[in-house]
Image (cartoon, helix red, strand yellow):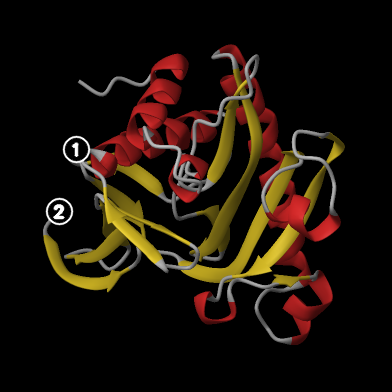
Amino acid sequence: MEKRQELYAGKAKSVFATDDPDYLVLHFRDDTSAFDGERMESLARKGMVNNRFNAFIMEKLAEAGIPTHFEKRLSDTESLVKRLEMIPVECVVRNVAAGSLVKRLGVTEGQSLTPPTFELFLKNDAQHDPMINESLAETFGWATPEQLAEMKTLTFRVNEVLKRLFAEGGLLLVDYKLEFGLFKGEIVLGDEFSPDGCRLWDAETREKLDKDRFRQGLGGVIEAYEEVGRRIGIGFD
């Protein structure tokens, strides 16, 4: 399959067309951003690490029967994916209190959440990805009730699979966000799953091993990503 022109450049990934209108090339760059792009930095090896991490996770989810846009890894930094009509709503599941939930509600970081919470956010950088609900999504045409229901079901199925996978590596899946789109009328998981879009802590020490290391200036960002990967069986050599 032939890679063609760049269609879109996000904060950390670029998307390229191919000679097949149903497929795209996703290029993972070394760029890292925080606070809606206010802080940007290039971190060596990040594109490679996230590309391999994402491929591994997407394959595990596909094995569990969850439809994804991922087709195959093409190189250290590129993957072939289905071309989706993206739904501009992010689905967030929280198993442990952290991040914006702590700020909004004044709850204690690290508090276990039983049952896990489910939240929706509008994918809109200019508005800082505001929290929304099903009624707003339906009224403004961002998603239908049927689509939202399927997205919620799939998001919790992802939680079941990945909580178990990370627990086997001595890791706690604190929270994560997912994006979905339509491929030939079917709701499919899109974007990526990497430590850029989730929180992962050491289950014993509660050491942060995700993008919070960048947000909070803790250092060792890529080393932490690689540590998580090694614990669940991803090779980076």
Q: Could one spot residue 65 in this view of the protein? A: no
3D distance between C-alphas at marks 1 and 2: 17 Å
Identify residue type, mark 2: Met
Say whether residue 144 is left or right of residue 17: right
The correct choice, above or below, for 221 with respect to 145 in the image is: above
The front one of 131 and 77 is 131
Q: Position of residue 164 (x, y in %)?
A: 65, 21
Percent across and percent down for residue 81 are 34, 52
Q: Position of residue 35 (x, y in %)?
A: 50, 63
Which quadrant of the view contains residue 34?
bottom left
Residue 34 appears in view: yes
Classify mark 2: helix, strand or loop.
loop
Residue 140 appears left or right of 56 = right
Residue at 55 percent of width and 76 percent of height = 124
Q: Earlier in the sequence, mark 1 or mark 2?
A: 2
- Which quadrant of the view contains residue 173? top right
Say above or below: 100 vs 176.
below
Q: Which mark is residue 1?
A: 2
Amino acid type indicated by mark 1: Asp
Tell me which residue sits at (69%, 38%) in the image.
157
Residue 95 x/y as whole percent:
75, 36
Q: Is residue 207 above or below residue 135?
A: above
Residue at 31 percent across and 41 percent down: it is 51
SS for tag 1? loop
Labelled pair 1, 2 in contact (Cβ < 8 Å): no
- Image quarter for residue 150? bottom right
**Label annotation for residue 76:** 1
Mark in the foreground, 1 or 2: 1
Q: Which residue appears farthest toward the bottom when viewing the image?
A: 140
Mark number for residue 68?
none
Give the camera-side residue of 143 and 212. Answer: 212
